[in-house]
Image (tube, rainbow, N blue to C red):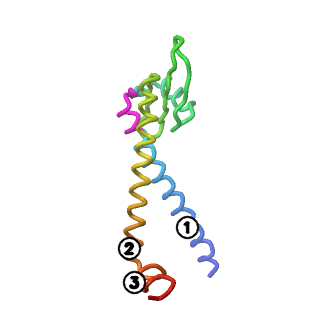
């Protein structure tokens, strides 16, 4: 019995962590697809110095800096591609637009799925006639 008190919580914690890692990977792939579509360029870290620099950057977040008096946007991904995605102001504007469109499409998909489930779910508003029972 004591063995189960240890194994079950450990299994649940491990399952949670694996699930979170899978979600993070999916988010990273989706973000990188949007960056690519927006015109960001992938710059792989090939030398040990570049890999060290890549690992020192904030991962999986679009960052901003100025280079040669021009805005530069970058996204570091040391885990998946071992690269930095870079883009100018125009690429970032396209990325933002694509991100909004992607979020709207995702919300519409979720709403459609919820509506479909509600149509077929018996119960409060389903085949029983709503809250009035008719």
Q: Earlier in the sequence, mark 3 or mark 2?
A: 2
Placement of 30 over or under 21, stated as above or below: above
| Residue range of the region highlighted in magenta in the rendering | 32-41
Which residue in the rendered view is the most extreme toward the left? 37
Which residue has dot 2 on it? Answer: 119
Which residue in the rendered view is the most extreme toward the bottom? 133
Which residue has dot 1 on it? Answer: 12
How far apart in space, not on screen, are marks 3 and 2 (Cα)? Answer: 9 Å
Q: Earlier in the sequence, mark 3 or mark 1?
A: 1
Q: Magenta stretch mostly in which secondary structure? A: helix
Residue, x 57% and y 34% (percent of image)?
Answer: 58
Q: Nearer the viewer, mark 1 or mark 2?
A: 2
Q: Nearer the viewer, residue 125 or 73?
A: 125
Query: As drawn, is 12 to the left or to the right of 37?
Result: right
Q: Nearer the viewer, residue 2 or 118?
A: 118
How far apart in space, not on screen, are marks 3 and 1 (Cα)? Answer: 37 Å
Q: Earlier in the sequence, mark 1 or mark 2?
A: 1
Labels 3 & 2 near each other (Cβ < 8 A):
no
Query: Which quadrant would residue 83 be assigned to in this image?
Result: top left
Query: Which quadrant would residue 119 be assigned to in this image?
Result: bottom left
Query: As drawn, is 91 to the left or to the right of 72?
Result: left
| Mark 1 residue element | helix
Where does the C terminus fall, quadrant-wise? bottom left
Labels 1 & 2 near each other (Cβ < 8 A):
no
Which residue has dot 3 on it? Answer: 127
Image location (x, y in percent) of residue 33: 37, 39
Inspect the magenta stretch and tell me whether residue 39 lies in it.
yes
Residue, x 51% and y 83% (percent of image)?
Answer: 131
Residue, x 41% and y 34% (percent of image)?
Answer: 35
């Amino acid at each position: 019995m004591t063995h189960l008190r240890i194994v079950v919580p450990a299994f649940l914690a491990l399952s949670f962590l694996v699930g979170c890692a899978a979600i993070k990977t999916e988010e990273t792939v989706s973000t990188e697809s949007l960056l690519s579509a927006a015109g960001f360029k992938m710059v792989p870290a090939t030398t040990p110095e570049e890999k060290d620099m890549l690992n020192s950057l904030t991962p999986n977040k679009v960052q901003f800096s100025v280079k040669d008096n021009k805005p530069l946007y970058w996204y570091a991904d040391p885990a998946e591609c071992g690269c930095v995605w870079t883009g100018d102001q125009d690429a970032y504007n396209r990325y933002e637009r694509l991100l909004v469109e992607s979020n709207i499409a995702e919300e519409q998909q979720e709403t459609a799925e919820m509506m479909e489930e509600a149509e077929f779910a018996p119960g409060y508003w389903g085949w029983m006639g709503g809250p009035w029972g008719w």
